[in-house]
Amino acid sequence: MALEADIKAQLAQYLQMMEGDILLKVSAGDDKVSREVLDLVDELATMSSHIKVENVKLDRTPSFSVNRIGEDTGVTFAGVPLGHEFTSLVLALLQVSGRAPKVDQKIIDQVKNIKGEYHFESYISLTCHNCPDVVQALNIMSVLNPNITHTMIDGGAFKDEVEAKNILAVPTVFLNGESFGSGRMSIEEILGKMGSEASASEFNEKDPFDVLVVGGGPAGASAAIYSARKGIRTGIVAERFGGQVMDTLGIENFISVKYTEGPKLVASLEEHVKEYGVDVMNLQRAKRLEKKDLIELELENGAVLKSKTVILSTGARWRNIGVPGEAEFKNKGVAYCVHCDGPLFEGKDVAVVGGGNSGIEAAIDLAGIVKHVTVLEFMPELKADSVLQERLYSLPNVTVLKNVQTKEITGTDKVDGISYVDRETGEEKHIELAGVFVQIGLVPNTDWLGDTIERSRFGEIVVDKHGATNIPGVFAAGDCTDSVYKQIIISMGSGATAALGAFDYLIRN
Ligand SMILES: Cc1cc2nc3c(=O)[nH]c(=O)nc-3n(C[C@H](O)[C@H](O)[C@H](O)COP(=O)(O)OP(=O)(O)OC[C@H]3O[C@@H](n4cnc5c(N)ncnc54)[C@H](O)[C@@H]3O)c2cc1C
């Protein structure tokens, strides 16, 4: 398998940045993927004098490990790390060669101090845009700490293993043979899961903020930047910095940028926020807000932060159908991300619940991969744009069921079907299938606020034109508010409004 010219050109540039020699240990057989792996490592070796290759027998064939000369690092790729994993391969080559990973020194120290043996295995698909973050984080940990190893396993090349382990969502990570987690995880999240999170006392000791932003999506990032630029003490608490943008593949409507990708935009947002010395408290979930002399924000870890003003920008999350089997079979056939998990259902039958734009886009995508897609829409008509509907109806392997109510997702250890009621006849029916993709919109992340803040009947925080809520000093922005449209640029605009509103409030009080 020869690398495509543009990939080769990019690689050549990156390989010039290698700082020392590395040894690729390759385990290959006679199969097609083995030949591709051999071609890839041979091609790499011809492109840089720093790269040596040795044939060995590793735990999985085909696979190859990336090592320093005379020292195994534990970074292994099982399958061919191209597609979305191309960057993971490049970074592994550079980091093993001696180039420092781009992570905070605090994180590097945390990883280096981990004691005990940790063997990670991550199952990925080459079309999954959430997977590289996990692969790259685990690779960095392996490079930094000799007690940590990580093998990336392409589910497409190791189908039997994926079936045997019942893996129906990627990335899925195992640690020392036991299930560790699934979905996108940053290095901080992985460290948190391994039990080395920051303690509550670190937060309790913080001085009160002028503006404390809750939520690190586009609304929160914008609110924090606008506040900090006023020279006032600004903090940001986020369960996961980046919010929904982290789950977004292509973005074509972020004005002035023709095309970008979610994680790339999030990296720029984070860099911009940090530029102004904002105190970023990532991976921290707020659980209670109370207005006293100052506004108090309690975190899940028990710490209480204090601030003169608060900007709520906790965004939204996927809406669940709320039927039996949905929670039970999450990641065992119930999925929300088509780009990530679609390839795991290749050649199988699946359903998409939801006939809006996202549901129909998902069904069109899936139809190109799976055997058959059934779309279930509650209303008598699909709500998606007509151009999407036309495309959908032109596909040979799609069935659309309208005016039906999903009743149950069935299965034993994984999904084996879906039951629904025909709302016109009342007849209950069951379809046998392997996966259900839920695409029925979003709900605001506001349940944790209790009755303190006025909200709409959809749970959205009611704000005025200054971004102010009913509680003096508490402002809100983005998808968690009652703004009519939910988009990145709109969230950023409302984040700026809320920050200026909060600054105005501070001046007057
Ligand atoms: C798949 C997908 C594709 C999309 N594509 C586009 C697109 O192409 N263009 C576009 O303009 N828009 C797109 N959107 C919509 C866009 O992503 C959202 O409108 C935008 O992200 C909303 O920003 P936000 O900051 O209000 O909320 P979010 O992005 O949802 O961020 C919320 C933040 O709050 C944090 N949080 C939540 N609860 C708590 C808590 N209790 N404590 C602490 N932190 C908390 C979250 O971790 C996160 O950091 C897409 C959305 C999705 C899901």
Image: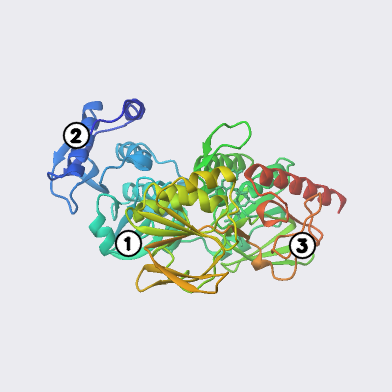
Q: Position of residue 490 (x, y in %)?
A: 68, 44
| Quadrant in which the N terminus appears | top left
Answer yes or no: do the residues labelled 3 and 2 have beta carbons within 8 Å? no
Which residue matches tag 1? Answer: 175
Is 280 located above or below residue 407 in the figure? above
Residues at circles 1 and 2 in contact by the CB criterion of under 8 Å: no
Q: Position of residue 478 (x, y in %)?
A: 68, 51
Label placed on residue 294: 3
Q: Quadrant of the C terminus?
A: bottom right
| Viewer-closest of 496 and 228 | 496
Residue 247 showing in the rendered view:
no
Q: Is residue 315 left or right of residue 261?
A: right
Q: Please, what is the three-letter code of the amino acid marked with disc 3?
A: Leu
**CB atoms of marks 3 and 1 within 8 Å:** no
Q: Which mark is residue 52?
A: 2
Q: Tell me the residue at 28%/33% (across/down).
A: 20
Q: Amino acid at mark 1?
A: Leu
